Image (cartoon, grey):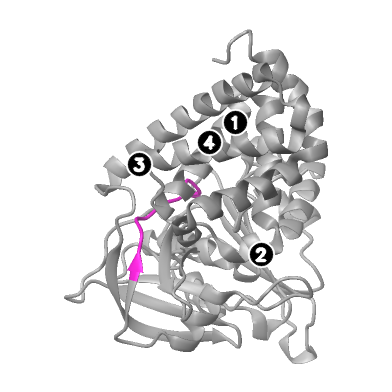
Amino acid sequence: MLSAFARPFIEASVAVLQAHGIAITRRFYADLFEAHPELRHVFNQGNQANGAQQGALAAALVAYAANYDRREALAPILQRIAHKHVSLGVGPAQYTVVARHLLGAIRHVLGAAATPDLLAAWDEAYWLLAGELIATEARLYERAQVTPGDLRELTVCAVQRETHDIVSFHLQGAQGESPGRFMPGQFISVQVELPDGLRQQRQYSLSDASSRPYWRITVKREPAGHDTPEGRVSGHLHDHVRVGDVLRVGPVSGDFQPAAPEGRPIALLSAGVGITPMLSVLNTLADQRAPGAVLFAHAARSPGHHALRGEIVRAHERLPGLHSIAFYEDLPASERAANVVAGQMTLAGDLLAPYADAEVFLCGPLAFMRAQWRALVAAGISPARLHREVFGPDLLGSLV
């Protein structure tokens, strides 16, 4: 618990961080990489280049300062961060390095306003938070029976093109065995060495059921935007990884594990490559021949952009309670069908009625998840039954 001394300083920091948070995090990462260039292998340099990581850290600092005494608000965020850290191999020693450079960045940006008392309060708050994360991560490492930074080598046994910009890679152990069990919805990190010698890890959801004799990841090539570079890791996997190659991967991680209480329906809503963890759930339910009601709704730009579409068709053969529907922004007349809708995803009225008491799971671009979250709450779905998986650095997953 934060001390009575530190509380007023942390509370007063909310407005300061809202005004100066980005400047602090930019300075933090610049100083961190200058002093410890080896950490460039740990942090996503694409997100550094486009500013996403700096923005996410600034938002996290504001959120912590505003909610330090709200355990129920912080707990799920800390779980999400801990799983991400374990997938990247973050260990206790790195927290000391981060503390030194984060406090240094606060001191540099705020200048005279960064009084000794303010810095002491943030030092206390940081280590209170870090202690919780270190303890949680230690339990996750112990459960996975690995130490921080452990990577295993898996062989690519199949490569399957799903759409023009999405490819699936099937991974097995050296003897052709399954790499192990996992919970549907979880992810692994994949490390590649790029031509300039930079090693980078990215997280990819496992996109099939755990019962398969392989792990499958389904990777979208991330295109360049007007102010963002092309995804170097996804591009490397698409262009260079072939059957027989070996990939280095981290432990199974992730607290997004969709399930519904017995007798209750489950709704799986996705867009784009966000379909990947949902298919792991759907195929697991199909393997189990689950008797309950399942809604599987997916949004894509067009039928040609709908990855792994055939697996939903096959799941219908084993799940009598499955209702699937696809939403396409560009829908040719030849693709029109009873379970296909033109336009963006809209769940309301008769479609949503059978799932009024469902556990609802969301995965896709943040704009998509925000829109669905708000629409579902407006339709009477309790926020307590809404869950989401956030790809990328926005671990807070703000949907309001």
Q: Distance between the residues labelled 1 and 3?
A: 18 Å
Where does the image place residue 116, in percent across and percent down from the top left? Answer: 65, 19
User: Tag 4 or tag 2, which sits nearer the N-term?
Assistant: 2
Indicate the secondary structure of the residue bearing disc 4.
Answer: helix
User: Tag 3 or tag 1, which sits nearer the N-term?
Assistant: 1
**Label 3 amino acid?**
Leu
Q: How far apart are marks 1 and 2 (CA)?
A: 28 Å
Label 3 crowd bin: few (<14), some (14–19), many (20+), radius 10 Å: many
Label 1 crowd bin: few (<14), some (14–19), many (20+), radius 10 Å: some
Question: Which quadrant would residue 400 be assigned to in this image?
Answer: top right
Residue 257 magenta-highlighted = yes
**Label 1 amino acid?**
Leu
Residue 242 magenta-highlighted = no
In the image, which disc is placed on residue 100? 4
User: Tag 2 or tag 3, which sits nearer the N-term?
Assistant: 2
Q: How far apart are marks 2 and 4 (CA)?
A: 23 Å
Q: Mark 1 points at which residue?
A: 74
Where does the image place residue 258, in percent across and percent down from the top left? Answer: 50, 50
Q: Is residue 96 left or right of residue 330?
A: left
Which of the image's four quarters has the N terminus? Answer: top right
Q: Mark 3 points at which residue?
A: 140
User: Tag 2 or tag 1, which sits nearer the N-term?
Assistant: 2
Q: Mark 2 points at which residue?
A: 49
